[in-house]
Image: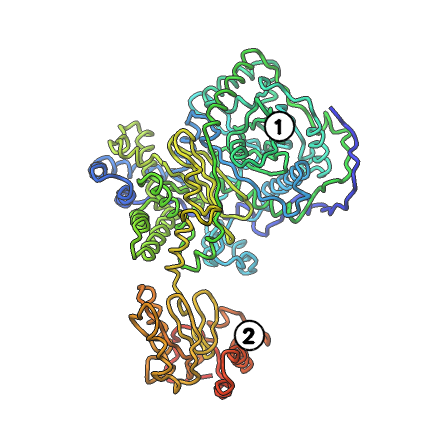
Amino acid sequence: MQRNLIDSTAQNVNRLHGDDYQYIHKSDIPTYHFQRSLRRLPIPKLPDSCRRLIGAAEAVLRKEELESLKELVEDFKAHEGPKLQRELILHDKRNLHTSYISEPWFDMYLSDRIPCPINYNPFMVYAPDPDPAYNDQLTRATNLIISYGRIKRALDSEYLKPEIYYLNPKTATSKPFNWLCKNLSKNLRWYGAAAFGAFPLDMSQYKSLFGGSRIPQKGKDWLLHCTDPKHFIVLRGGRIYSVDLFDNHGSIVPAEQVQACLSIILSEQNHLKPEDCVGSLTSLGRDQWAEARSELSSIGNNSASLALIDSSLFVLCLDTLKSNDLSQLCESLLNGGDARNRHEFLWISYEFIVQIDGQGSATINFEHSWGDGVAVLRLMEESFCDTKQNHFVHPNQNFNTAGYWGNNLRPVDFMLTDSIRQKIQEAQQKHVAIGSKVRFSAAECFEMNRQFIKQSKLSPDSIMQLAIQLTFYKLFKEFVPSYESCSTAAFLKGRTECVRSATCATTNAVLAIENNKSNIGELIKQCSAMHSQLVKEAATGQGFDRHLMGLRCTAERLGWLQPKLFSSAVYQYMNRFILSTSTLSTETIAVGGFGPVVPDGFGIAYNILNSKMGALISSYKDQRTTNAFADTLLENDNDQGPRTTLSRLNDEMLECQQIGIGSISKYGFRLYDGQFLYGPIAIFPKAVLSWRVLTPDDITPESMQFFTMLEPKLDVLVVGPGDRQHVDPEEAAMLFNMLNIEYRCVAAALYPPDDLLVTTNDQVRLMNMYGEPSAEKSNLFGRDDKLELAKKAMRKYLSENEAKKMDSLPTSRFLIPGKSDDRNDGKNRN
């Protein structure tokens, strides 16, 4: 083992001292401040869940299967269902400290005997550090580890900011909000926050984020949590090391110490033989791993080594892999790698493992029983922002490696027998055989993104789910049960709910797109509305999957016979998710992935960002092909090739993206997208033109003539000249918007109104939107110089005579849209 001084070009280190180094931040509101006041996860009404089950089945079942399910559901509602509902409600009332789904959800994971890799553990890849110099393996690892320590200390001291969903992010820094939340009694805090449009989320999973491990046992595993760990585990070349992150007083050690310890590990060239890599045993089925662990712990001092691993903060894998092959990278990140070739294998049973490869790419792989990714995602976002802002160590800086070996850095050794070595080799063979069947493909689309979809007044998530349904139908000509994960963290001990993203609305839209129907735009809007409703129901505890699971588990708990509904083939098919999807829409994560949940299924992790949409698709290669799915889902590089699913949807979105009038002033009109247009306009469903009239007197048959030359011919022409003897512009704009939404071929010729009133209510609305008027903002509100800006913007379109005519227009003030209560006879005219 080399223990020397690393000499390189020194850099100036931006040092943090004291609490600024020890804590990532110090929140005024304690971390778990809202836990006692969180609402409890509601139990849906039995008829509602039965109705929702049938609604989901209508999209994916054949007629005879649907009729069979309806009969089973009616029988369930008439017999076992009401009894199980009563028992579930009573059990829930006896356990006010938790939710009705929390214990069954833990049991589902911990009782399952299949291996964790591929089947359960997902992975999420950090975006690279914006400064490429800080993406080398040693620097990236050290900076992330120090940040994890800062988060851990803030979490333990309840300095970490509570997890709150803000309707308005500015609320987080509002003094009245913070004062009220800190001073309300424990049972009222959630309601006080909600009054400000801030909704605290459950943080019970955060207590298991550090220092936890899933311990294998025959029949059912259990979760170990160490409350005060000081070290983390490092895997490299098959060897295992323990490295201190906290000193004996609980303070984070200097970053250079961690950097030196990791440097020593990276310099070690004496890698273990594959049959000595103990971590491979964690890839076994849970009963097999339990047997192997029991045998392993009975040998020599191995039980102490296992205890050291089980009680660590987290596991760091310093991978030797350097590859630009996406499929190879993702396979390694998902299943833990092949210890026979690279000697690396993750300790899969741990709460989370951070893996940093030879090119500095950082990934988290986490065990799923203890949490649903809520706490892990927060960990990644906090640490990513922290390490961008604070580089605790730098590349090419001086540090001394002497004195750490045996003190702050210790090997974790195991004594192995031939029997254990044989089990390790068998585990590696099984793991590689299964892992080699999984394939990944990725795709990105830059012409379709969150901003573009929102401008169309549609849900970005619904569009991606529709694209997935359309892709699957293009390839396989069927609709199948589909799963999208939705968090129920808005409730105490909430976990997840299933959004059934295959609906009758998606079916209708897919068939219309495939057959080039004329009403595709309207069907896409119906898909968006239906999907938004399903997401809302799921997030508020009104889905049906967890409720029915709770009823089934209630029968098991009471020793009752299972209802025929739950054991029926049609119900089991409805819970066999061939399309399993999850979204990771954050700039912190470059890509995420997970395995298919059934042999002939797809696992689809996607993100929808302001710049692009992307997806990573997994499948078993002998069942489905990810390449075909990715090529069909997203635009490929061949501009001459066939139109793919999202590029086709992009065209349809452009077709259904309507232009609408949001507000009116005496200078012109503000569109839905926030664009302000000065002066008279001619507006159509897809375009806006300047209309060259300067006063209502100029509105003549000649000035309207160009409307008669449009193709296709207009169904309706709405004229709003600003003359009170005709339809006024506000009513004309409303009529245009209404007809436009109904896909009528409509145009509107609009002239800014000449006699709008500004009322007290208008001024209140104005201040709510823009704040108190200042000298700078007064121009925005419609002073004389604002009119000059409007005239200046229009002059380039006008002749000299027209410009003179325009200069004679009167000055006016800004109108906030909407009818005012006191806008009637002009008594409140300003």
Label 2 packing within 10 angstroms: few (<14), some (14-19), many (20+): some
Q: Give the residue type at disc 2.
A: Pro
Q: From this viewpoint, which residue is outermost toward the top?
A: 418
At mark 2, the secondary structure is loop
Mark sitting on residue 628: none
Classify 522 as above or below 571: below
Q: Position of residue 512 (x, y in %)?
A: 30, 51
Q: Give the residue type at disc 1.
A: Leu
Q: Nearer the viewer, mark 1 or mark 2?
A: 1
Classify 221 as above or below 183: above
Report if the CB atoms under discs 1 and 2 are less than 8 Å apart: no
Q: Nearer the viewer, residue 473 or 319?
A: 473
Residue at figure coordinates x 30%, y 40% from the top left: 478
Mark toward the start of the polypeptide (1 vs 2): 1
At mark 1, the secondary structure is strand
Residue at figure coordinates x 51%, y 54% from the top left: 610
Q: Nearer the viewer, residue 525 or 305?
A: 525
Q: Position of residue 681 (x, y in %)?
A: 42, 75
Mark sitting on residue 235: 1
- Mark 1 and mark 2: span between their CA atoms? 60 Å
Mark sitting on residue 773: 2
